[in-house]
Image (tube, rainbow, N blue to C red):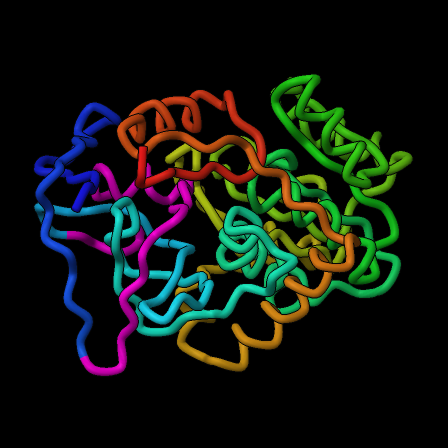
Amino acid sequence: MRAIRIDRWGGPEVLRLVEDAPVPVPDEGQTLIRVERAGVNYADTHARDNTYLARYELPLIPGAEVAGTTEDGTRVAALVPNGGYAEYAVADAVAPIPDAVSYGAALALVLQGLTAWHLYKTSAKLAAGETVVVHAAAGGVGSLAVQLAKAFGAGRVIATASTAGKRELALELGADAAVDVNAGDLAAELREANGGRRVDVVLEMAGGRVFDASLDALAPFGRVVAYGMASREANRVPSGVLMHGSKAVVGFWLVHAMRHPEMVGPPLEDLFGRVADGSLRVVEGGTYPLSEARRAHEDLQARRTSGKLLLDPRR
């Protein structure tokens, strides 16, 4: 089968198309999926150089999410430990895709959608009327989180993004204000976008200066929920800073939720329903041929993309 294989750790150049990768054989209880679309996520760039929270071994077929058909023709989506950038993949558990939901939308929901859902419901425990800041608001998680915020009770939604076009998209998706994430004093810009008041919840996936500014902008009892580190810059938070502002920093990694079926099935059913009835829009950011996985990674890291990125294994 065709697949993208990594034989050494490094940049996008290590993503190599092979035509003769063996078709994976499912163990008992696993499902073989003929992949129609594979999802591309920022975490894949960390897997590529082995700097992610999970550790990998070479050779590696990357990719953590797939959508396609089972042997009996059922349309399904699934998260996989690896092996998604290929024509076939095996999964421990699959989610049937409703007829009204495309493969691309299903992929966005099964990882980014579930992440956005749990950022609010599980980690931030969003309360009615609270102000929410969504960083990377035009991205896969961010574009869904902007839309879910008010559905889950937020009062005001402030988006950040790196370009005017991405900020405009965030406003179209329902944000009340959009801020340039590269602003010199980001914390002050966030407060200004909230009428001079501090904010209650920040969904943060960059790390580095964006994390620090987010923490600085929090109101008493506010929460920063960290679910990524795209800048690859680590942060240290003194306990006195947390105590002085009665602030909280909460981490989230979807892997932990995936271990509990009740944290996957009902939220995913909720998200599929919202897409089916038109109340939630999935922003599909482009479908790349499998042979151009390297370009997909380059575009993603250069911030040239919006929404959900996909790979087509047949091309």
Q: Residue furthest front?
A: 72
Left or right, 94 with respect to 238, comes to: left
Residue visible at 55% across and 76% down in the picture: 265
In the picture shown, does residue 236 fall above or below 17? below
In-front residue for pair 268/12 = 268
Find out whether residue 59 is within the magenta segment. no
Count of number-bearing discs: 0
Relative to 197, residue 285 above or below: above
Residue shown at the point (21%, 39%) measured from the top left:
4
Q: Position of residue 65 (x, y in %)?
A: 38, 54
Q: Answer with the quarter of the image where residue 124 lies.
A: bottom right
Question: Is residue 174 toward the left or the right of residue 304 in the image?
Answer: right
- Residue 28's quadrant in the figure? bottom left
Measuring from the top left, give residue 108's x and y in whole percent.
Answer: 54, 50
Above/below status of 133 relative to 163: below
Q: Can residue 238 be seen in this view?
A: no
Identify which residue, 227 or 38, lies in the foreground.
Answer: 38
